[in-house]
Image (cartoon, rainbow, N blue to C red):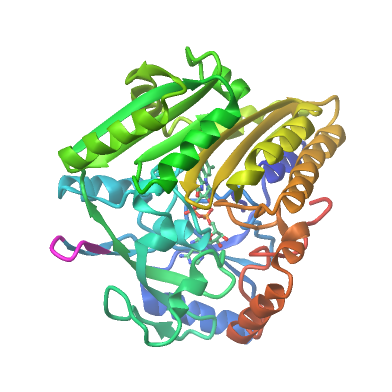
Amino acid sequence: MRDSWPLGVMRRRPRGAAMAVEAVRPQSYQEVAGLLRRASAEGTVVVPTGGLSAVTGAVDIQPGQLALDLTALNRVLEIDELNLTARVQAGVNGLELEELLNRRGLTLGHFPSSLPVATVGGLIATRSSGQESTFYGSIEDLVQGLTVCLPDGTIAEVLPGPRSAIGPALHEIFIGSEGALGVVLDAVLRVSRLPAATHGRGFDFATLEAGLDAMREIVQCGVRPLVLRLYDREDTAFQGSTAEGCLLVAGTAGEAALAAAGMAVLEARCGAASDLGEEPFRRWRERRFHLSRERLLETLAAPGSFADTIEVAAPWDRLSALHAEVKAVLAAEGIGLCHFSHAYPQGCCAYFTFAGSAASEAEAEGAYQRCWEGAMEACFRHSATIGHHHGVGQVRAPWIRREMGEWWQVWERVRSSLDPKGVMNPNAVGAARKTSS
Ligand SMILES: Cc1cc2nc3c(=O)[nH]c(=O)nc-3n(C[C@H](O)[C@H](O)[C@H](O)COP(=O)(O)OP(=O)(O)OC[C@H]3O[C@@H](n4cnc5c(N)ncnc54)[C@H](O)[C@@H]3O)c2cc1C
């Protein structure tokens, strides 16, 4: 059993069906605790699973290991409309949660493209980020508390309060832990009221640098956009946009007066671009979940095909050079596209997509590996982090120690003290990448 990692799909292609593994689908917290206790005693490897939409190879379960399917823990335990929190079990589907909140006039504001398939537990365990993160924040901003089960069966419950200074916020080590430290059972999530008004436009920038400058000025001037997505020239054309240069999709939301004022600021900061009106924003919103797991698998169905996405983040002054270097690497192998989203005052995420086809499976894997290696090396040259929101799994394992430096030791000590028997997910956060499956 595996997640949606493109290289995992490519390697499985010649062989066909995946190997069967033992899976359990616990119905209660006590059942999870009992399973983990027994696994620790017997030394059985356990891998928590949600919607299997991770794209890193974090879920790659072998015979003899146990798949711990959390999707039966699917209850929304409480929605507190006054204090704006929702307590939700780990197996709740992301889109179903969002629709339920919407019916109450609320939103989680977390919109990864995989929302229709991902679970709350998976979104937390991969440290995910949604398309409107510039406004609502990423998952770490949305998690107020967690209930987790440790590998020895101990259940640690949600702590009180909207914020606390009673020691470090230890639950946060589970955000991005990819099932290495135990199992997320439920989360108290910060929710928002649905915005009264939303405005959106598209702008056509003559150069990528002019678009990046405008994005930076917008997020540094104090306005909080709903969305800012700048596509490079090739990605603009790929999107089917009428823009001749680089398309920026920009939006604001909130109280009517705030959303309108925010949009006025955005328009002023985009003065160097041609205003394309509301259509690009509308079109982007309609198609926001079109990059589905099914489409990814379709793309990879043909023998010799390869494709993946690489999302990294860099300070503003390094983005243009990083973009040029990674694009050159990708273009040498096939198609390379890039858009910039998830903007912060300090920098931004660059999201590269690559695809191509080769004469043999071995050549396809070679091209795939060269794309990743070139992109990762460019990150190290430009003070970029090698991963913004998909996590580590197997795909980034070869580079994680280089990025983390001495923090790697801290992580290893945390991991081995919580999981001394080493039974939790062996492909989480930094396991060695296999050269063949
Ligand atoms: C088409 C597509 C688009 C995507 N778009 C985005 C995007 O816009 N933004 C983004 O951030 N990500 C995106 N992703 C990747 C993202 O990592 C996953 O979609 C999602 O976060 C994983 O959730 P899941 O429930 O599918 O988890 P799974 O894939 O089942 O598991 C992911 C990891 O979490 C662990 N895990 C799962 N549940 C638990 C639990 N309860 N306790 C402890 N560990 C657990 C697993 O062991 C594994 O390591 C996309 C993926 C696809 C296929």
What residue appears at the point 27 percent right and 31 percent down from the top-left corner?
A: 199
Q: Where is residue 77 in the image (x, y as percent from the top left)?
A: 24, 66
Residue 262 in the image, given as x and y percentages of width and height: 28, 38
Q: Is residue 83 magenta?
A: yes
Residue sitting nearer the eye, 415 or 300: 415
Q: Is the magenta stretch mostly helix, strand or loop?
A: loop
Q: Nearer the viewer, residue 277 or 139?
A: 277
Which one is in front, 337 or 72?
337
Whether residue 229 is visible to the viewer of this picture, yes or no, is: yes
359 displayed left or right of 421 = right
| Residue 310 seen by the camera | no
Q: In this view, does 122 lie above or below 109?
A: below
Q: Is residue 382 left or right of residue 190?
A: right
Using the rendered view, name the quadrant where residue 76 is placed: bottom left
Horizontally, is 208 left or right of 433 in the view? left
Write down the region rendered in magenta.
Answer: 81-86
Q: Is residue 403 above or below residue 103?
A: below
- Most foreground residue, 75 or 428: 428
Image point 29% across, 48% down: which residue? Answer: 98
Q: Where is residue 190 in the image (x, y as percent from the top left)?
A: 29, 61
